[in-house]
Image: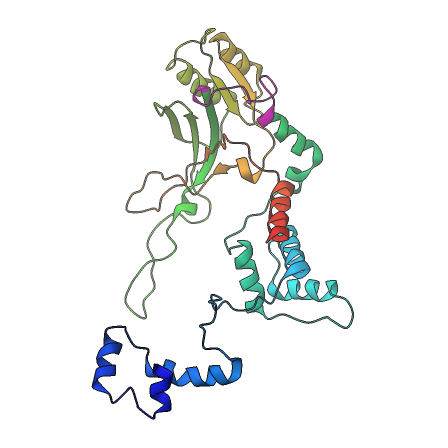
């Protein structure tokens, strides 16, 4: 009907009946009517095209996307220029090309990579022996690890040192042309030592000791452990608590081990440092007053679910690329 009206020279834009039908959705728009003869002449049909989603063509695909994910996993601090040079060298001669920074960024977004603040992991953390120690700690039963220990029975202990000048606020406000300044500690100041223990029990047991001193001695640590042991029931066949701590010299003392064992509880030393099981210095809130910003409390974050090894994470990413 629309084509016959167009062939007769009728303009749907001026016919009130057709305008009324268009408002009711019973007659096509005049733009559509104008395109139908063209489509009939070019394609031989006026059937509607199959919707394709109007997605843009992806530049980085296949092996180039694979190499991009591999390079980013191995070198998380690499710049777009460095990745461009690597991708350029992986292409065969005669087909080499360079990508723009936006094309690399879009490809990384498709892979799930996001920009975030990084941290340096010590080389010792990636030594084969330390990787094996961490695996044993998470996957072997007591006394080698904590695989068979209930989360509620764990008591994790750690320490941190805080200097007053490190908690001074950096930014403030004042009138234009004036300096923001106030009296406060600068240079060498007093050190505070924080010792904290966290239990996995749903009751939320916490023990905190914040004292102005240069460090922790065996006597200080002994008294802190003793205060915890006097606050919890003695260990028995039904339930024994397991203390987790690092291998600081004051923690390795035979007095500490004997004290914990005398109350019927157990002790497991944490595996060597790694960022997946490191103590959190920023996600835990602490006391706050009007003169200093919040003091970060160093508490141990326990990933009770088994964490992936870095190469397992890399393999998962590459598998995602290969199947996408």
Residue at x-position 29% and y-position 86%: 12
In the depicted structure, whether residue 30 falls above or below residue 262: below
In this picture, is 187 found above or below 207?
A: below
Q: Is residue 157 left or right of residue 3?
A: right
Q: Nearer the viewer, residue 250 or 93?
A: 93
Stretch in magenta: 138-153
Front one among 12 and 82: 12
Compared across the picture, whether 86 is left or right of 113 comes to right
Residue at image point 46% right, 67% down: 51
Residue 121 location (% of width, % of height) = 60, 44
Position of 96 relative to 260 (above/below): below
Residue 199 falls within the magenta-colored stretch:
no
Where residue 236 appears, as percent x and y from the top left, is 46, 7
Task: Report the residue at 56% width, 20% height from top.
Answer: 268
- Magenta part mainly helix, strand or loop? loop
The residue under the point 38% across, 49% down is 168
């Amino acid at each position: 009907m629309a084509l016959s009206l167009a062939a007769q020279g009728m303009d749907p834009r001026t016919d009130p009946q057709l305008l009324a039908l268009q408002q009711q959705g019973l007659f096509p728009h005049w733009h559509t009517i104008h395109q139908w003869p063209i489509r009939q002449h070019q394609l031989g049909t006026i059937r509607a095209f199959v919707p394709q989603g109007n997605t843009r063509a992806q530049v980085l695909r296949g092996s180039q996307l694979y190499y991009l994910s591999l390079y980013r996993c191995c070198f998380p601090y690499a710049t777009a220029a460095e990745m461009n040079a690597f991708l350029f060298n992986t292409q065969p001669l005669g087909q080499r090309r360079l990508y723009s920074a936006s094309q690399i960024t879009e490809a990384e977004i498709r892979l799930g990579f996001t920009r975030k603040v990084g941290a340096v992991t010590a080389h010792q953390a990636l030594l084969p022996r330390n990787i094996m120690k961490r695996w044993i700690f998470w996957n072997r039963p007591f006394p080698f690890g904590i695989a068979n220990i209930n989360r509620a029975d764990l008591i994790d202990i750690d320490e941190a040192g805080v200097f007053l000048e490190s908690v001074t606020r950096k930014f403030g406000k004042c009138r234009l042309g004036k300096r923001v300044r106030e009296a406060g500690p600068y240079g060498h100041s007093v050190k505070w030592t924080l010792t904290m223990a966290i239990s996995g029990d749903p009751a939320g047991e916490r023990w905190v000791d914040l004292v102005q001193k240069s460090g922790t001695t065996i006597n200080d640590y002994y008294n802190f452990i003793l205060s915890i042991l006097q606050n919890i029931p003695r260990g028995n066949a039904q339930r024994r608590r397991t203390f987790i701590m690092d291998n600081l010299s004051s923690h390795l003392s035979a007095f500490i081990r004997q004290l914990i064992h005398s109350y019927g509880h157990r002790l497991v030393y944490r595996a060597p440092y790694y960022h997946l099981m490191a103590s959190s210095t920023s996600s835990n809130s602490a006391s706050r007053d009007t003169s200093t910003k919040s003091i970060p409390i160093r508490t141990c974050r326990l990933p009770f679910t088994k964490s992936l090894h870095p190469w397992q994470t890399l393999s998962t990413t590459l598998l995602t690329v290969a199947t996408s």
